[in-house]
Image (cartoon, coloured by chain):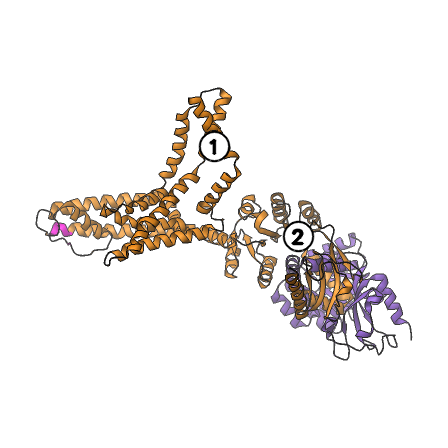
Chain colours: A purple, B orange
Amino acid sequence: MFDTKSSNLEIVLFGYGSTGSKVYEMLSANFTKITVVDRDERLIEKAKEEGIVTSVTVDLTNDSELEELGLEGKILFCAMDEMALNIFLALSLRSIASDSTILSVSTSAENTRKLKFIGVDKVIDIYESSANRIVDIITRPAVTRVMDEIIYVDNGISIEEIEIPPDSFLEGKCVHDINFREYGLILIGISDKELGEDFIFVSRGINHKFDAGDILVLMGETPALEAFYKKLTEKR
Amino acid sequence: MKRFLVRQIVSFAYLLESSPRYQRVKRFFNDLLNNDDYPYKKYFDLFMIFVILSSVSILVIDVHEHVAYWLDFYDLYIVTWIFIVEYLLRLWVHSDIHKVIIAHYEESEFFEKPFSFWKIFKQVGQEKWAYITSPAAIIDLIAILPSYREIRVLRVFVLFRAFKMLRYSRSLLQFFDILRSKKVELYTLLTLLSFFTLTASIMIYVFEGNGSNPGITNLFDAVYWALVTITTVGYGDISPVTTEGRAVAMLVILTGIGAISFLTSIIVSAFSEKLPEIKETRVMNQIARKRDLNLICGYGKIGQLVAKKLKENRRHFLVIESDPQKVQKAELDGCDVLMADATKSDTLLKLKLSENVRSVICVTHDDIINVFITINARSLCSDVEIIARCSDKSVSKKLRMAGANHVIMPEEIAGMLGSVYIGQPVAFEALQAIITQKRTARIDEVEIKLGSFLDGAKVGDFDFTANKLVLLALLKRFDSTDRKSHYVLFNPPDETPLRAGDILVVMGYSVSIADFKGRLEQSVRYKK
């Protein structure tokens, strides 16, 4: 990968039940440093049998045991099957590791609200996202097909975000000055530090000026993305 | 002589059998008269109801005022003729005479038996007689009678024309169906009531018919009094005057109250028993004409969300659920629900799977049931889209084998979303925003219509950027005949040709997309 960021991320996955094991499966495709934590010894044994070395049994209601895991700065993913425990865990984690990114699964709008209230960075409603997908298949089949090709299918097409480094060739240029199609890429949008963290879709038609630190969201084939990244990091 | 006649008749029967025109005409009339799914039957029904109402109105107006001559003419000739023609048409489409003749002829040839006119006559007669004696046909026939003005009593039969309306109104027919289901109870009650009425009327006649009560002079008066009393109507125009008579009256009143409440309870219970069925017919009627129906099998967590979102997208859907509690929930949420088992082929056949249904969404909580529904649907229809949910990977494989087009694994989707979020939070939020259409930016699909300005053009011919659109991908058809199979071209180069049926996947704000779609649509109209 041209972007070394994601491979360095350390993820702690809480829960290895029916939800957790599937989340692990999806995570392990993209990330290598994953620790699996569960309070059920049998599940951890199962995880070990399946080849996950970094798996530990921890009493999740005990804060001191959680602290021993060293959670600061890591990405914490709550995927316990039992929703009440999941919310409790998210709350404990928020109080222990204040600057970590916390993700959690949710099973209803009500739980989502509670989790957001606690301060979880990203709540994923299992059923809501499934329902969205079903409805998309029915109402916008072509869009869904394209999204699937980007996200699920390993055909080299992907959406990546690239941060503009200082002193790159983009510095001082505007969106309309650069023809991304020449690079075989599509610029979807920009997240600008100057304008807050808000995401600007390119289709809004604003001729935005590029600055170092802006995050570009680009779609294209991996070699094209890599080539562009290389060009970007070259000093002027 | 007979041989000649037989040959003539049989060859005529074959002629009818082989004539597509005759078949078409007959089918048309059959559809018009009897097929509820035939779109033009509705208009025919409305026309007949109008004719009936006008005829009855003329009867009512005629009581006091003399109606205009042309109205009388209309009632006497036109209405009558319409009814006669309808009656004969119904008699005609009820059964096929020529088929009976052919069947009999072929049988007699096969067994080398003599061709018998009598047998044909008997069989045809039986079939037609079965129609003539059916209640609806009798009403039809009686409704024609009032045209014979010589007998005044017959005028009342004009009201039978009103009864004819039953034929054209399904809800009224349903009412009779409900009563029919309680036939035994109603008969019992009727026998009991007539027995009581008869006994009471004889008793009152014996006690008061001898002149002591001026109101009761004959047995008819006595029966009239008994019926008025037993039904708790009690006009009071005739009332008992003797002690014996009053004693009879007290007994009749008590039994009357019992019998009437019994009658009410029978009808009420019949209705409540049939309530699910009534609801079902209502739902079936509502969805019968909807094409592109989506079936949601199972109203659990995902089912509820899908129903809600489909409603927001204004798609037609029907929930199929077997759990009464969930059915009730769906009803409260305002969905069309059918309480049925989607694993049974009857259920899906009833919904005309291959004609009306676009997709089957299997989202019950049980993987095995989802597999069953998938197999059921796929075995009945090869081109319906099936989306099935499961939580086990091994089941996912089975669902694919059973014929599901899409398999949804909720936990897997959660994991996938999580991993995209961790790796690329900005891209994720952007995608999420366009996928869930929460902001105004969204991704949409635009099909190139035949004859529009992009049909036959190249990608580069249209300036997407100037129109504030981003062309993400192009879905091209594998071949021009198959509407469904497409392959995806990401970021297509300018020289890529565009053909009708290709789908453009564009990103942009709702207004830009709507504008683009509108322009495509308009260009089609102008070219033609």
* B215, above or below B466, in the image: above
Q: A185 or B341, which is in the foreground?
A: A185
- Residue sticking out furthest to the bottom: A194
* B338, above or below A175, in the image: above
Which element carries disc 1, helix, strand or loop?
helix
Looking at the rendering, the stretch of residues picked out in magenta corresponds to: B238-246
In the rendered image, residue B243 lying in the magenta stretch gets the answer yes
Q: Can residue A162 be seen from the camera position used here?
A: yes
- Residue B91 at x, y percent in the picture: 40, 39
Which residue lies at the image location 61% right of the left edge and 66% below the top edge? A109
- Residue A29 at x, y percent in the picture: 79, 58
Chain to which mark 1 belongs: B
Residue position for label 2: B390
- Quadrant in which the C terminus of chain B appears: bottom right
Labels 2, 1: front one? 1
Q: B308 or B447, which is in the foreground?
A: B447
What amino acid is at disc 2? Cys
Which element carries disc 2, helix, strand or loop?
loop
- Residue B266 at x, y percent in the picture: 35, 49
Real-space CA distance between mark 2 and mark 1, rounded to the nearest whole angstrom: 52 Å
Chain to which mark 2 belongs: B
- Callout 2 and callout 1 share a chain: yes
Which residue lies at the image location 39% right of the left edge and 41% below the top edge? B88
Residue B237 falls in image quadrant: bottom left
Residue A53 falls in image quadrant: bottom right
In the rendered image, residue B482 lying in the magenta stretch gets the answer no
- Residue sticking out furthest to the top: B112
What amino acid is at disc 1? Lys
Q: Upstream in the sequence, badge 2 or badge 1?
A: 1
* B513, above or below B145, in the image: below
- Residue B51 at x, y percent in the picture: 36, 53
Residue position for label 1: B99
